[in-house]
Image (spheres, helix red, strand yellow):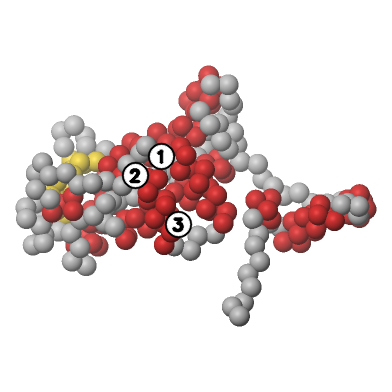
Amino acid sequence: MATIKVLSSGAFQIRVVSKLLPKPFYATFDTREQAVAYSHHLKVLLDQGIVPATLAQEKGEQRTPWTVQRCIAEYLRTQSVPVSEQKLLDTIRERVADVNTNDLNYEWAEKWIRRMKHIDNLSPTTIRHRHGALARCIDWVCRSHPQILLANPLRLLKRGFSTYTAEDSLLAAANGGKAKVDIERNRRLDADEEERILACLRESPDALMFFVLALETAMRMRECYTLGLLLPDP
């Protein structure tokens, strides 16, 4: 069972006792939300008879972490992932090549989001897409390899994490960027606009096909470009 205690520093400490563990396990978190999420995930594993290596190992013993780059590679190798998400993870992989699973905590998650705002100056939508892609990858690592990583810190971020705050706006501006906001894409063609566009594209079959595909399916440009043909098995 797990109990949560508020320390004099204001941090939240969990204490886990189980017959599967050689001794009580302690961990400290900045917020109650993080402590509750971690203890719940740990309880699910222990109820299944799974003891993460970080809890079973003796004091001073070191485990071999995975790099986030390896997490992504193993996830893409073993799971069926849409092409659009593969491309997102390929982009993310370049930025987190030196990060390993020992570094994946709530502080790292917040720093990664801040970097996407302050340095990369990405839009909230793009930040959420990258967060979602990596979060699903890390979820798989937690489920399939709990001895490598027990909890996913990306799932602890509060709602609205991708929105630029006043401080984010100042820091982005200091790096030559600006605050980005979500842009609602609710474009509608005028009565004769579609016909005029089609007329302009008659001499360019590829552009015409792309326009009709996007118009009729409402797919994004990336989805149109990466669309593949699924053929039945012979």
Please name the residue shown 65% across and 51% down the image.
222
Q: CA distance from mark 3 to mark 1?
A: 16 Å
Residue 179 position, x and y percent, is 58, 29
Please name the residue shown 91% across and 52% down the image.
203
Residue 225 visible to the viewer = yes
Q: CA distance from mark 2 to mark 3?
A: 14 Å
Instruction: Tell me whether circle 1 and circle 2 mark residues in contact (CB < 8 Å).
Output: yes
Relative depth, front residue between 123 and 166: 123
Please name the residue shown 14% across and 58% down the image.
1
Q: CA distance from mark 1 to mark 2?
A: 7 Å
- Mark 1 highlights which residue? 97
Other residues around mark 2 within 10 Å, as few (<14) / some (14–19) / many (≥20): some
**Image position of 195 (left or right of 143):** right
Q: Amino acid at mark 2?
A: Thr
- Mark 3 highlights which residue? 76
Can you say whether 48 is above or below 202 in the image?
below
**Residue 112 placement: quadrant:** top left
